[in-house]
């Protein structure tokens, strides 16, 4: 109880210190003018020089420029150029900040660029590389998801191939049985 009363006392005391007291009402001989209070006094701000009408474009360090170029190419759908720029960025040991993003985007660009099994394998290899080199990357969940989808696609293809092989074997066996049946019908029965 004593502690809370002390807190209330300190709070009200600090409020009274900072309170602004109103100015005395103007007398008939004084014109009514606003009296500046300590809080309403403004300090003049320094004048800033005007901005030039055209600012020069910021120059990026070469490694970062390669990454930015890769991003531009990727956004425009120029995936082969994006892969080239991202690879140039990754090969430089100076900057490592966006290497996980570049690795992920290379995987996507390869997947988007072509449909051959070689491109698909190279794309999946980039996602695996991302997971092994940058396990804390925010791109890892997407890479895992893509790899799991590809795994399901491969399993479905394998199942389809197995089913097609069974169908072919059964069709061949049916044809063989039809031939045997046809031969039986055409050969006379001996008594």
Image: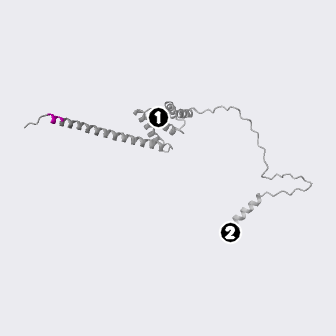
Residue 93 against residue 137 in the figure, above or below: above
Q: Position of residue 5 (x, y in %)?
A: 69, 67
Q: Position of residue 181 (x, y in %)?
A: 18, 37
Hey, which quadrant is residue 150 in on the image?
A: top left
Residue placed under numbered mark 1 in the picture: 112
Q: Which residues are magenta?
A: 182-186
Mark 1 → mark 2, Cα distance in angstroms: 72 Å
Precedes in sequence: disc 1 or disc 2: 2
**Is 42 left, or right, of 104 in this rendering?**
right
Residue toward you, 169 or 112: 169
Q: Nearer the viewer, mark 1 or mark 2?
A: 1
Image point (23%, 36%), residue name: 175
Q: Position of residue 187 (x, y in %)?
A: 13, 34
Residue 92 against residue 22 in the figure, above or below: above
Q: Quadrant of the C terminus?
A: top left
Circle 1: element type:
helix
**Is 112 left, or right, of 165 in this rendering?**
right
Q: Residue furthest right?
A: 29
Hey, which quadrant is residue 65 in on the image?
A: top right
Number of numbered discs on residues: 2
Tag on residue 15?
Answer: none
Circle 2: element type:
helix
Residue placed under numbered mark 2 in the picture: 2
Type of secondary structure dominating the magenta stretch = helix
Indicate how the structure is coloured in the image: one colour
184 magenta-colored? yes
Q: Residues within 10 Å of mark 1 (few under 14, many from 20)?
A: some
Residue toward you, 10 or 76: 76
Q: Position of residue 81 (x, y in %)?
A: 51, 30
Q: Quadrant of the N terminus?
A: bottom right
Image point (47%, 44%), residue name: 141
């Amino acid at each position: 109880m004593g502690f809370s009363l002390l807190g209330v006392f300190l709070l009200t005391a600090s409020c009274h210190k900072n309170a602004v007291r109103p100015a005395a009402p103007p007398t008939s001989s004084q014109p009514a003018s606003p009296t500046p209070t300590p809080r309403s006094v403004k300090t003049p701000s320094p004048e800033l020089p005007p901005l030039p009408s055209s600012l020069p474009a910021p120059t990026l360090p070469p490694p970062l420029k390669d990454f930015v170029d890769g991003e531009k190419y990727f956004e425009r759908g120029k995936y082969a150029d994006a892969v080239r720029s991202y690879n140039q960025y990754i090969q430089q040991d100076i900057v490592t900040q966006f290497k996980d993003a570049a690795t992920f985007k290379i995987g996507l660009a390869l997947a988007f660029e072509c449909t051959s099994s070689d491109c698909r394998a190279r794309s999946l290899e980039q996602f695996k590389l991302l997971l092994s080199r940058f396990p804390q990357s925010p791109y890892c969940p997407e890479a895992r998801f893509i790899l799991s989808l590809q795994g399901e696609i491969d399993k479905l293809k394998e199942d389809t191939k197995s089913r097609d092989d069974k169908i072919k074997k059964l069709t061949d066996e049916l044809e063989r049985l039809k031939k045997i049946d046809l031969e039986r019908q055409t050969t006379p029965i001996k008594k």
